[in-house]
Amino acid sequence: MSMPARLRRLAFLAHRWLGIGGCVLMLLWFGSGIVMLYVGYPKLTPAERLARLPPLDPADCCVGLRALPPPADGAVLTSVRGRPAYVLGTRTYAGDTGAPEPATSPALALAAARAFSPGASPRLDGRIVEDRWTHSGGLNPHRPLYRVQVDAPEPATLYVSSATGQVVLDAPLAQQRWNYVGAWLHWLYLFRNRPADPVWTWLVIALSGACTLVAASGVLVGIWRWRFRGRYKSGSRSPYREPWMRWHHILGLVFSLCTCTWIFSGLMSMNPGGVFAAPAPAPDRVAYAGPAGDAPRPDDPRPVLAALRAAGFAPVELRWRRLGGESYVLAYDAHGDSRIVRAGPRGPRITRHWQPEEVLPAAAALFPGWRWRSTVLTDYDAYYYGRHEAAMNGGAPRGLPALRLAGDNGVLAYIDLRSGDPVLILSPSQRVGRWLFYFLHSWDLPPLLRAATLRDVLLILLSAGGILLSATGCVIGWRRLRTKAAARHPPGPRRA
């Protein structure tokens, strides 16, 4: 047998036998993918968290940063259990005295749940390290977590940090139920036991790789068997007379492109072998913040709060930051809007965002010695864009305007001028990963995201085609297995 004939035979065998199990997985993935368009994996987005916080009143808040352990530049003045409190790292300090708050207890966890859901009746459901809704690595500093069930018009499970006493995740009951046929099923989280689970990781990689092989071999087999010129004796361009086989052949050709790209991009989402490496060396965020100089620092929150309220802004959270050696306050209201507060000779100065020329000197310290080309973005581009809350990266902050820095080495850096934070830094390999995963899997180009309804309709129609393709494959595989089993175990002679 010649080499091309052997390769063709291997393609037929791979598609036939790997496809029996692969079609079941792809059927689940296509169906759960439709659910994920509208219901995401549980998370507490910044907008949801800020909306639950009460306004900070300068009349009864708070002691200054000097009452906290140094250094206090990363301090956050927020509300914990409905009262003003400073959060510094993973420690919480009373806003009125600066004294350390006691360790989170079951009673304090219930108080946090009551403040998060006023009028509800919370009940403690134990203290856990991880469960099916808390796989996110971002929760690691807060583990173990107190799990609290909330009986309300919209029942939910709340997770309270044992470190800070804050609610760090909410999982509404309706979202949990949809997740069993959505993200939890799509990512095969039933096989995941801890935040860093190499067994689960390589299981998903292996299954995704096998299904990619099934889809790719199916494309080859489908093209080889299709007669582009002439027809078979049946009058069809497909050789299959049996309906399930014929429809599987035709559906495979029609939906082959989206099937292959979705399965392959799902494999790429796992970053197999670490092929999408982060920039090396890592960005120097300490140099970007700069040293604490002699410039005035807005340590006292009371004049900051008073100035914000006088400007018509109702803050619910203050965050102390430093940029290029200058300390400032980043203030948020309950709607997620923000203001920059800087110390001035006549009191606090309030602006909506930083100016690019103010940020550029500090930005040069992110990667010392590298050459950059800077651009100010007033609209999203192919790498820096926002997503709705249900999306996997829906909670990521992507404010405008933004400063875009393009390095000669292919690194891209984006600084949100509303906050002054470098929120996205991509190496050349990560930029490739953006196209191989996010684009192929989610069609998340900004023009398509703006045409949200059209994008959803197209994705649902193509997913429905993938479901039909996978379902016909499941039927064919089941019939083949049943035939093989009958051939191995023929029925015995019938008794008279």
Image (tube, grey):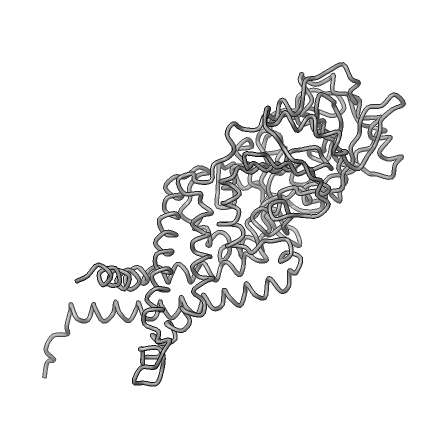
Given residues 193 and 28, the one toward you in this image is 28
Image quarter (top left, top right, bottom left or bottom right) of the C terminus: bottom left
Q: Is residue 200 above or below residue 286?
A: below
Q: Position of residue 147 (x, y in %)?
A: 55, 40
Q: Is residue 231 left or right of residue 439?
A: left
Say if 362 sits above or below 431 in the image.
above
Residue 132 is situated, as x and y percent measured from the top left of the image, at: 48, 46
The residue sitting at 73% across, 15% down in the picture is 293
Quadrant occupied by the N terminus: bottom left
The relative height of residue 486 versus residue 127 in the rendered view (above or below) is below
Q: x, y (%) of residue 461?
A: 53, 68
37 or 100: nearer the viewer: 37
Q: How many marks?
A: 0
- Residue displayed at 78% across by 32% down: 340
375 to the left or right of 157: right
| Residue name at image x 39 percent, y 58 percent | 25
* Res. 115 image quadrant: top right
Q: Furthest-top residue in view? A: 294
Residue 372 in which image quadrant: top right
Q: Which one is in front, 253 or 348?
A: 253
The x and y percentages for residue 137 are: 51, 37
